[in-house]
Image (cartoon, rainbow, N blue to C red):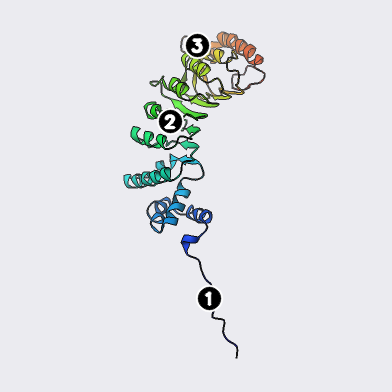
Amino acid sequence: MRKKNSSKLIVPPWSDFDPFLLSHILSFLPLHDQLFVTPYVSRAWLTATLDTLFRNSILDLVLIDEFNDEIQRLRFTHLLRLAINRYHGWVSIYLPRKYMLSYFAMVYIAERTPMISSVIVPCDVALHACLVHTSLLYWKNLKVFKARLNSHEGLLLQQLADSCKNIVELGVHGEITEKEVSSIIEGFPLLKILDISESTLCHKALSLLLDGKLRSLRELDILHCSIVGDDGKDITHPTSQMLSMKFNREIQEKASRLKSVKFTHCLGIY
C-alpha cells in the first residue's frame, strides 16, 4: 500500500517577496490604495510603496496634482518625508503644476537632496523665485534647470548663476530681455543647451546670444518665439517687413558663424 505524499507546498511570506516584483505589482493599484492601504500591511510593503511612488532616482512631485482633497495630499507628503529620509540618492526633481509647495517644504526637501542635478518645473507654470532661492543654496551640483520665468522675479537667473556654477542645460521661458541674456552669458560658461522657445524675446537679446560668447553652446532653441523690437512690436510680423528683412539678414550672418551650434527656430531666415 502506497503512502500518500504528505509534503505540502511551502509558500514564503509576502515579507520575503522580491521587492522589485512587489513594487511592480503595487504600481497597478489605484493611488488611493497606495496611500492608505499597502503601507499598513507590513514594513516590506511600506518600502515597496515608497519605491512605487518615488521610483529610481527621480523625485516626482507632479503626483500631488492628482489628489482632490487635503487628506490625500497630507498622506502623500507624509510618505514623501519617509522616502526622503530613507533614500539620499535623488538626482532629479519634478515640481507640481497645480499644487504650490510651501517655502518650508521646499527647504526641507532641498536640505535632504544635496545630490539633485536636475530641476524641472512645468513650462506652463510661472515659477515664484522665492520657492527656489534658498533651495539653490543646497543644490550645488545642479546641471539642468527648466522653468518659466515670472516677470516679477528677475533675480532668479542671477541667483541660479551665483549658486550653481555647473549648469549645462537651461530651459527658461517667458519674457527674455538683454538683462536675462547677459545673466545667462556671464553666469553659465559651461552651458551646452539653451531652450528659450515659446518666449517673448527682445531682438537685441537674440543678437547677443548669437555673438558666440557662449563658447560651449551646442544647441539653441528659439522655436515659436515672438521677436520684439525697441517699440515692443513683433518685428517678424508681415506689417514690419522692412525691419524684419534687416533683422533676418543680421541674424543669418551671425548664425552662419556658429557652425557648431544647432539653431532651432521658425524665423525663415534660410
Depth order, front residue of 42/260: 42
Query: Badge 1 is on which residue?
Result: 8
Query: Badge 3 is on which residue?
Result: 229
Q: Looking at the rendering, in which quadrant would you find the N terminus?
A: bottom right
Single out the mark in the foreground, 2 or 3. 2
Rendered image quadrant of residue 222: top right
Can I make out residue 100 in this image? Answer: no
Residue 54 screen position, x and y as percent: 46, 45
| Disc on res. 236 | none
| Disc on res. 138 | 2
Compute the Cα span from label 3 to label 1.
Answer: 82 Å
Q: Residue furthest bottom?
A: 1
Residue 91 screen position, x and y as percent: 50, 37
Q: Residues within 10 Å of mark 3 (few under 14, many from 20)?
A: some
Query: Element at badge 2?
Result: loop
Label pair 3/1, CB-CB below 8 angstroms: no
Single out the mark in the foreground, 3 or 1. 1
Label pair 2/1, CB-CB below 8 angstroms: no
Depth order, front residue of 16/255: 16
- The three-letter amino acid code for the residue at tag 1 is Lys
Compute the Cα span from label 2 to label 3.
Answer: 39 Å
- The three-letter amino acid code for the residue at tag 2 is Tyr
